[in-house]
Amino acid sequence: MVLTAILNINIMRKIEHIGIAVKDLEVSNAIFEKLFGAPAYKFEEVASEGVKTSFFMNGPNKIELLEATNPESPIAKFIEKKGEGIHHIAFDVENIHTEVARLQSEGFDVLNEIPKKGADNKLVVFLHPKSTNGVLIELCQEINE
């Protein structure tokens, strides 16, 4: 048991970012720019997910704002159901394939077993909130090109 705990220390190495669903990216960017005293450092559209994003740094922490680009996107559905707010917490992992296999073996419900390209040069996989106490978890691995 102790050996397992020691081996698993760095599986999820850090919080990579917190994703916040917003109705209007331009309006929200202005709010967060005032909040952090600095503009977003990156803007990106992920067409496959139907989303436009912006990223802010606050110390070592990243905040991702997400606006739906179509009414069928996961962000549009989230806002329709729950309103604007925290959408997901993303964790940095060293090997996304190994981590997906480990989490599946632990009984977590993986939404996309095959990692897909996400924003900010990452491969991403999501865990269903029903298996993580109601929180959508994103696993992120830097794409090394």
Image: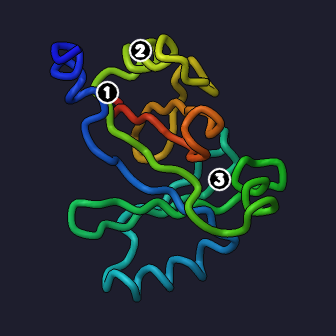
> For numbered disc 1, what is the local secondary structure?
loop
Residue 91 on image: x %, y %: 37, 41
Q: Quadrant of the C terminus?
A: top left
Tag 3: Cα neighbours inside 10 Å, few (<14), some, or many (≥20)? many
In this figure, which residue is indicated by the disc labeled 1?
Answer: 145
Tag 1: Cα neighbours inside 10 Å, few (<14), some, or many (≥20)? few
Earlier sequence position, callout 3 versus callout 1: 3
Residue 118 sits above or below residue 44 on the image: above
Q: Nearer the viewer, mark 1 or mark 2?
A: 2
Residue 3 on image: x %, y %: 16, 13
In space, the residues marked 2 and 3 are separated at their CA atoms by 29 Å
> Is the C-beta separation of discs 3 and 1 under 8 Å?
no
Earlier sequence position, callout 1 versus callout 2: 2
> Is the C-beta separation of discs 2 and 3 under 8 Å?
no
In this figure, which residue is indicated by the disc labeled 2?
Answer: 102
Amino acid identity at mark 1: Glu
Amino acid identity at mark 2: Arg
Which residue is rendered at x = 66% and y = 74% of the image? Answer: 24
The answer to which image quadrant residue 70 occupies is bottom right
Residue 32 sits above or below residue 132 on the image: below
In this figure, which residue is indicated by the disc labeled 3?
Answer: 51
Amino acid identity at mark 3: Val
In space, the residues marked 3 and 1 are separated at their CA atoms by 23 Å
Q: Nearer the viewer, residue 107 or 66?
A: 107
Left or right of 99? Residue 132 is: right
Q: Residue furthest front?
A: 1
Left or right of 66? Residue 32 is: left
The answer to which image quadrant residue 144 occupies is top left
Residue 126 on image: x %, y %: 55, 33
| Number of numbered tags placed on the structure image | 3
Q: Quadrant of the N terminus?
A: top left
Residue 129 on image: x %, y %: 62, 40
